[in-house]
Image: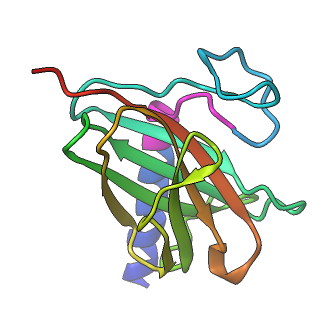
Amino acid sequence: MKSKKVTSASVVILVAIALMLTINSSFAQTSNKTDIIVDGEREVKNYSTTSKESTMLEGTGTSKYGKYKVQVNWTSDYTGSENVFNIHFLDAKTGIELPGLTYSVMLFKGEISLLDGTIRKNQTSPQQIYMFKEEGIYNLRISSIDGTREKIDFPFQIKLRQP
């Protein structure tokens, strides 16, 4: 019984933190004003940050059922340094965290250029770390969530390290 209280308290804390840190960024069918246009059909928010800032990215799954909400806490850095992505899955209806789900993750430069060596299948770790050689707009794609066809894309910008 005690573990259920800890789990409930953890969920309440996670929801409170998410509410405080969440950027208005539902990527599935958004009509928000944007800072960067990746192409003529899709608008994305400019999530560029300064070195070692933490940014909460949030979106809902893109399948017709929208079963999952995905939260990504991105600790950003410049080119040549580690960028840490902490990934949390929540039930889209209840908001309850769903730990231990399997998923695939990959990186794109822009929206269509898959970066070699970035596909990681059947992941269960809530943390993914990537280093970027070049500045630019990237897209973190999380897919095959718990074996489903749901996916979510998180666009963000990496800046060049200044000498």
Question: Front-most of 71 and 97?
Answer: 71
Q: What stretch is highlighted in magenta?
A: 17-26
Residue 41 lies in magenta, yes or no? Answer: no
Split into 4 quadrants, where in the image is the N terminus? bottom left
Residue 22 lies in magenta, yes or no? Answer: yes
Q: Position of residue 133 (x, y in %)?
A: 29, 44
Name the residue at 32% across, 27% down.
159
Q: Position of residue 83 (x, y in %)?
A: 29, 47
Query: Image quadrant of residue 139?
Result: top right
Split into 4 quadrants, where in the image is the C terminus? top left
Q: Position of residue 69 (x, y in %)?
A: 65, 56
Name the residue at 63% across, 32% down.
25
Question: Front-most of 40 and 75?
Answer: 40
Task: Please say if 111 is above or below 4.
Answer: above
Q: How is the image coloured?
A: rainbow
Query: Image quadrant of residue 91?
Result: bottom right
Q: Where is residue 64 in the image (x, y as percent from the top left)?
A: 90, 60
Question: Front-most of 140 and 147?
Answer: 140
Q: As drawn, is 58 to the left or to the right of 130?
A: right
Q: As drawn, is 15 to the left or to the right of 94?
A: left
Task: Please say if 40 is above or below 133.
Answer: above
Task: Please say if 90 is above or below 60.
Answer: below
Query: Image quadrant of residue 157?
Result: top left
Tell how many labels. 0
Name the residue at 30% across, 38% down.
76
Name the residue at 35% across, 25% down.
49
Task: Please say if 33 is above or below 110.
Answer: above
Q: Residue furthest left?
A: 163
